Image (cartoon, coloured by chain):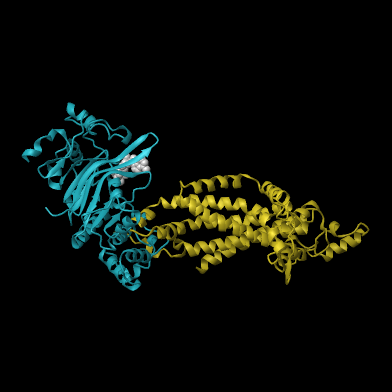
Chain colours: A yellow, B cyan
Amino acid sequence: MAAYIVRRILQAIVVMLTVALIAFSLFRFVGDPILALVGQDTTLEEQAELRKELGLTDPVVVQFARFVGNVARGELGISYGQRRPVIDMFKERLPATLELSLLSAVLAIGIGIPMGIYSGLHRDGWLSRVFQTVSLVGISLPPFLVGILLIYLFAVFIGVLPSQGRGDTVQLGWWSTGLLTWSGIKSLILPAITLGLFQMTLIMRLVRSEMLEVLRTDYIKFARARGLKNRVVNFGHALKNTLVPVITVTGLQVGSIVAFAVITETVFQWPGLGFLFLQSVQTVDIPVMAAYLVFVAAFFVIINLIVDLLYYVIDPRLRLDRTTSSDHGG
Amino acid sequence: MAEPLLKVENLRVEFPTRRGTLCAVDDVSFHIQPGEVLGVVGESGAGKSMTGIAVIGLLEAPGRIAGGRIVLEGQRIDDLPYEEKRKLRGRKIGAIFQDPLTSLNPLYTVERQLIETIRTHLEVSESEAFERAVSLLREVGIPAPEQRIKHYPHQFSGGMRQRVVIALALCAEPSLIIADEPTTALDVSIQAQIITLLKRLCRDHGTSVMLVTHDMGVIAETAHRVAVMYAGRLVEVGPVKDVVRNPSHPYTAGLMASIPVIGRKVENLSQIDGSMPRLNAIPEGCAFSPRCPQVMERCRRERPPLDTRGRTEVSCWLHAGESVDA
Ligand SMILES: Nc1ncnc2c1ncn2[C@@H]1O[C@H](COP(=O)(O)OP(=O)(O)OP(=O)(O)O)[C@@H](O)[C@H]1O
Ligand SMILES: [Mg+2]
């Protein structure tokens, strides 16, 4: 157990260091950070002094180590564009992105999995056919188009839901939440559907095909032959066996929800990290871009860790030593 | 003769397909006495498994029982609602399938799978079920059952897993076990052990067995009677001695001649030219007529009924009319 977890955590650290190296290279080698910081009237001597002061003359390895240390302490540098600490900007924007992503993930998982189970169990039912058709739409429409269609339908045409922004938010410490006001919740609905639709259909189709697969296995036939109740066979035996692949994909999808949020946030003018990132790309605000990169990577790494731990909980073949499995003979 | 435990009468299993209806089991009738082992043999695709699946009520759509009756202990079971059939499975009819490696759910311990089966059928407490599970494992020859019961399927070898499967089939003391090629997937060295175990257990518990196998050696050693299937039809059924030594049907004769060595498997019939027809191309009259060395004009036109000849029943025009003097 411990060895497995330690191994996973070490892998996660390696991944994060690699990402940090990329972020660091952005800083170091894309443009000149000094020119981005100083005004036009600074002399070359002053620039050189600043260069020294900021440690830019140290060996690259030392600089990288310092960079990693800073990131670990949450010092993400100063935004070139806004001349404010990036960490402060992130704190303002993070709640918007996380609340949106969370709701999308809940929608995708909470609706996608039951729909998948249903259409796996009732393969030829009419409702399953409806789900299949709907899912084709969800999987083939790009998110920005879904967003625009939803805005047109619900914000412009019917006019019941807002088309942009977060609505009113409530401050809880540094966290600003839109979940406690009516207008905040209304504002979340369209972006959450836009962001989660693709993942929902993907999860639904995956659960369906995994269910169909597992229901064909010998141990399910044998479970029925033992006279177990349908409910036990379908949910206790079949569903549990679909979990490993479903969790893998679901984990990745939750990760990509955060990544895809860039598009949805832009369509809905959602004041989150993705929107901030897009703006920073336009102004080549490298500290913000680098920090976003690190953030998304960290998110994926954490989700992967959780997925690995869940495997471990679900599948005994991973968690048991194999000393007893080598006995032979009948 | 005592009332049979299982009576299958004119069973017909159909699969509707786009290109017409396939008949996987066609007018099959046989019976199994209490405590009796009925061997079922025939080439691949003959309908052996389908017959067993129809009896335990696990035919999957679009397959369906299109005719006939299945009677267990005097009660008709083929027309019962799903839930009633489910209660019979495991309780009255146990099943053992071919591949022990895949018959057990990999995510649950043997303990959990045994206990859930026991408690599905018997009104016992968790601890009584546990006791029963341990003693079942001991009975099927698993060493140190108190410890082994806590293990997962992947921690057992193939032979041991098949023992667990047998224990699962025996959980609620069914009166009939359908064993569909229970040793085919196992190491040759282990096959005999499993068959011996199955034979002993069924004798001790008075359980009847429908034993589907390709191995005539197993039939000769284990079964009391044997049924021979061909293209979904029953061609001959009778006591092992009569059928093996003195087969009545030319197909059975070919089958026996092709396996001079006990333990050799029936894969193809070297003695008989051709191969079994596909279900969508079964000839008129006797299904075996195109390959039959003793074919007559009548065989190609009319389908022979299953007639009694001595202690066997055979479906062949060669023996038409003999039943009277038998
Ligand atoms: N879903 C299905 N649709 C159409 N035909 C089917 C279906 N399932 C099985 N069959 C047919 O039913 C026939 C009988 O199959 P069955 O499995 O009973 O053969 P078997 O005698 O057990 O052969 P084996 O020795 O290979 O196990 C086969 O010809 C098979 O093609
Ligand atoms: Mg078979």
Question: What is the quadrant of residue B139 in the picture?
Answer: bottom left
- Residue displayed at 41% across by 60% down: A232
Residue B174 lies, in percent from the top left, at 25, 60
Question: Which quadrant is the C terminus of chain B positioned in?
Answer: top left
Q: Is residue B218 visible?
A: no
Q: Position of residue A159 (x, y in %)?
A: 72, 52
Q: State how many labels appear.
A: 0
Q: Nearer the viewer, residue A317 or A107?
A: A107
Residue B246's place in the image compared with A80, above or below, is above
Q: Is residue A145 visible?
A: yes
Q: Nearer the viewer, residue B192 or B275?
A: B275
**Rendered residue at 20%/41% (across/down):** B259
Q: Is residue A179 above or below residue A202?
A: below
In the image, residue A19 lies at what x, y percent?
67, 58
Query: Is residue A122 toward the left or the right of residue B104 in the image?
Result: right
Q: Position of residue B240 (x, y in %)?
A: 15, 47
User: Does residue B256 appear left or right of residue B128 in this picture?
Assistant: left
Q: Residue at horizontal 22%, vertical 61%?
A: B201
* Above-or-below relation of A267 to A89: above
Residue B147 picture quarter? bottom left
Q: Nearer the viewer, residue A261 or A39?
A: A261
- Residue at the extreme left of the image, as rendered: B325
Name the side, left or right, on which A17 lies relative to B72: right
Quadrant in the rendering for residue B232:
top left
